[in-house]
Image (cartoon, rainbow, N blue to C red):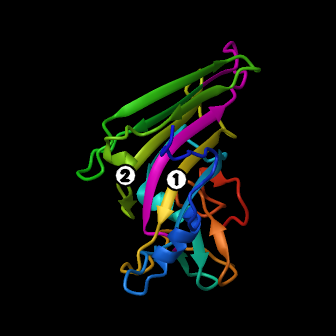
Amino acid sequence: MKGRKKVQFGKRRAGPPTNNRQVMRDEIPKLLPMVVDQLSVGITLRFLTTGLWTGSLTVTYQNLMDAWFLAGTATTTYNLFDFAKIRKVTVRAMGVQTGQVMETALVGVEFPGLVGGQFGNGKQRLGTGVGSDTPAFVSVKPDPMSQSAQYQPNTANAAFVVRAVDGLRAALYGAVIDVEVSYKNSADIAPASTATARAGLTPGQIYFGGLDGLANANTVARSAFIPIA
């Protein structure tokens, strides 16, 4: 028909690519983009129970801060971060033959959180392994609506509890504890010192500590990472 405009398919309207428009918008002098001025990182910390393990451990937020720290001097250490958020806790263990009891292992995780602002709603899970070829396994996330799933400051309040025992409730050594945690710092908070003093450190070096905040020689759950102190 006369007067009808011919339509062409497959052609794109002329104009700058989307990424170029984004760059141009971010470079407007009067509308500078926001930037993040703090260090934030997620990591899975791994720990192994030692001969000092008693079967269970209550881990505090201070313990989580002290699990990764900076040496200021040979004996002075500081936390790298000011806040921690727990994403998931996983425990694995193998049982040991004890008398007439087969190789049974019991592992557990609990989020008690009995302090205001850090309530954990009491979530608790237990895993069991029977036999030398069946490890006990448990993996628990804090409930999204609980305060255990939120960023929390450096306090001595309980973050979670981990357990690893055999069929007779004796402590299991060599159990593997993985803690998935997110850290971040704040420019308005002075760096806190770790709760436990160390010795013989290299100033400026970053170290990993035990899950209970104690030094490597005394901890009940030693870090699998290096260097440890």
Farthest residue, direction left: 116
Occupied quadrant, residue 7: top right
For the point 60% across and 54% down, the residue is 12
User: Between disc 2 and disc 1, whose residue precedes?
Assistant: 2
Tag shown at residue 41: none
**Which element carries disc 2, helix, strand or loop?**
loop
Q: In this picture, which residue range is highlighted in magenta?
A: 79-105
User: Whole-percent x and y of residue 210?
Assistant: 59, 57
User: Whole-percent x and y of residue 122?
Assistant: 33, 34
Q: How far separated are the C-alphas under marks 2 and 1? A: 11 Å
Residue carrying label 2: 150
For the point 59% across and 76% down, the residue is 70
Decide if residue 80 is in sight here: no
The amino acid pointed to by label 1 is: Val
Tag shown at residue 181: 1
Farthest residue, direction top: 100
Q: Is residue 226 left or right of residue 37?
A: right
For the residues labelled 2 and 1, say whether their Cβ atoms are less than 8 Å apart: no
The amino acid pointed to by label 2 is: Gln
Image position of 133 with respect to 140: above or below:
above
User: Whole-percent x and y of residue 216?
Assistant: 65, 61
